[in-house]
């Protein structure tokens, strides 16, 4: 019995469905014949009540000789007719065989499909769906085990091979990322000591040197300041990657009020006109208020730097999201910036020594950590950025 099960388990899908189809077709044929014979018996039983006798009629040749076995015809009994019940049963016995043959054919197709799915497809499909779900969640510590030599077994084996390769690649990438983080942190840390020494000597030259030395010291101080800012940016990226979202219950109106105050201060300093629009907010919402404020300040600083005269801000709350939109009336993003503005260290204007192109990258990363996204586009006039945060992650 075990050998039979193993044989059917390893049988190819094409042969399996053909075998199931033949099996159920034979069952349907036997069921149809059984139904027809049963209905014939019912008809004969009813006919026997009302027919007097069976007369035999024969064909003859020119010589009067009988040809063949002839045909038997029952004669009605005089003065008798079928009752209403017998007539219904008689007609039903005539109709049922004609109806049941297509019904049995349909049942044959249905049973073939159902048994084929249950025996050959349900388990491997379930395994593959569960494996795909785990892979989508970056969970690779599992195995796809389906022992069969049919096509689904080969597919599961290929899927398991892909999973194992993904696990190896993921482990290598993780080690590479950790090594890169370690090197970046060490570089940023080790760079500060020589920068501090050079900065001290530069200040001494600015105080005690001649005119040429002071001029040289001023140039050195400028480049040292840029190197310090670069080291700070590397440390910032390191902290950004390690940062975790901490959602707490905050009052929506208080959060938007603090954002409005920050916007008024920035716009006042940069002498830009501010339009602040806000909707109706919940008394409590589960968000990381500190993270949202950091993203907002970055977007606001960008807008203040590039706006011609006006900045517009809109904050809205939806069922599962909180969105912050910032417009400015500047020249907007170029086509290149629209594609790369969210990348680290992207700068369209290389002359800006103290800006390393991290603002929008930080916003994009923090939005994604909060379950949302950053959308960068051009409005009717100027640039438009939208930061979306998922509530209660």
Image (tube, grey):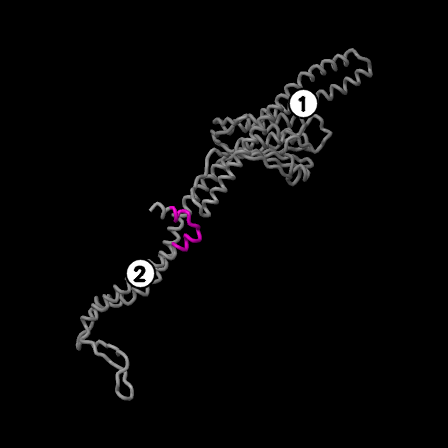
Q: Is residue 117 visible?
A: yes
| Near-viewer residue (240 or 138) | 138
User: Is 11 colored magenta in this rendering?
Assistant: yes
Compare marks 1 and 2 and give the one earlier in the sequence. 2
SS at mark 1 in the image: helix
Q: Which mark is residue 229?
A: 1
In the rendered image, the vertical position of residue 339 relative to residue 103, given as above or below: above
Horizontal side, residue 21 vs residue 76: left or right:
right
Q: Which residue is mark 2?
A: 30
Q: Are marks 1 and 2 in contact (CB under 8 Å)?
A: no
Distance of label 1 from label 2 (alpha carbons): 87 Å
Horizontal side, residue 187 vs residue 32: left or right:
right
Across and down, in percent, residue 332 comes to 67, 37
x 41%, y 52%: residue: 16
x 44%, y 50%: residue: 12
Which residues are drawn in magenta?
A: 6-19
């Amino acid at each position: 019995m075990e050998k039979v099960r193993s044989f059917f388990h390893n049988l190819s899908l094409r042969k399996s469905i053909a075998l199931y189809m033949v099996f159920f077709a034979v069952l349907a044929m036997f069921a149809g014949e059984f139904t027809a014979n049963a209905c014939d018996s019912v008809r004969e039983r009813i006919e026997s009540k009302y027919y007097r006798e069976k007369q035999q009629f024969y064909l003859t040749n020119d010589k009067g000789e009988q040809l063949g076995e002839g045909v038997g015809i029952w004669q009605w009994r005089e003065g008798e007719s079928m009752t209403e019940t017998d007539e219904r049963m008689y007609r039903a016995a005539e109709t049922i065989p004609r109806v049941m043959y297509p019904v049995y054919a349909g049942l044959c197709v249905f049973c073939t499909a159902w048994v084929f799915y249950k025996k050959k497809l349900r388990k491997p499909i379930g395994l593959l769906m569960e494996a795909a779900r785990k892979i989508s969640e970056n969970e690779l510590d599992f195995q796809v085990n389906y022992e069969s030599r049919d096509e689904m077994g080969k597919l599961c084996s290929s899927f398991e091979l892909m999973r194992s390769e993904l696990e190896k690649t993921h482990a290598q990438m993780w080690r590479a990322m950790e090594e890169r983080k370690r090197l970046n942190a060490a570089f940023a840390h080790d760079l500060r000591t020589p920068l501090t020494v050079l900065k001290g000597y530069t200040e001494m030259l600015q105080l005690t040197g001649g005119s040429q030395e002071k001029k040289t010291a001023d140039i050195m101080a400028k480049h040292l300041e840029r190197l310090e800012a670069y080291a700070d940016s590397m440390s910032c990226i390191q902290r950004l990657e390690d940062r975790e979202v901490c959602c707490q219950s905050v009052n929506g109106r208080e959060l938007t009020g603090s954002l409005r105050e920050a916007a008024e201060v920035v716009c006042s300093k940069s002498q830009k006109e501010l339009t602040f629009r806000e909707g109706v907010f919940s008394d409590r919402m589960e968000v990381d208020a500190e993270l949202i404020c950091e993203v907002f300040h970055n977007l606001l600083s960008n807008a203040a730097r590039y706006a011609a005269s006006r900045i517009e801000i809109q904050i809205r709350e939806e069922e599962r999201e909180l969105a912050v939109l910032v417009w400015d009336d500047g020249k907007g993003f170029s086509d290149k910036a629209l594609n790369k503005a969210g990348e680290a260290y992207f700068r369209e204007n290389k002359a800006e020594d103290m800006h390393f192109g991290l603002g929008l990258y930080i916003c994009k990363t923090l939005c994604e950590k909060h379950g949302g996204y950053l959308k960068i586009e051009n409005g009717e006039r100027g640039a438009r950025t939208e930061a979306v945060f998922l509530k209660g992650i």
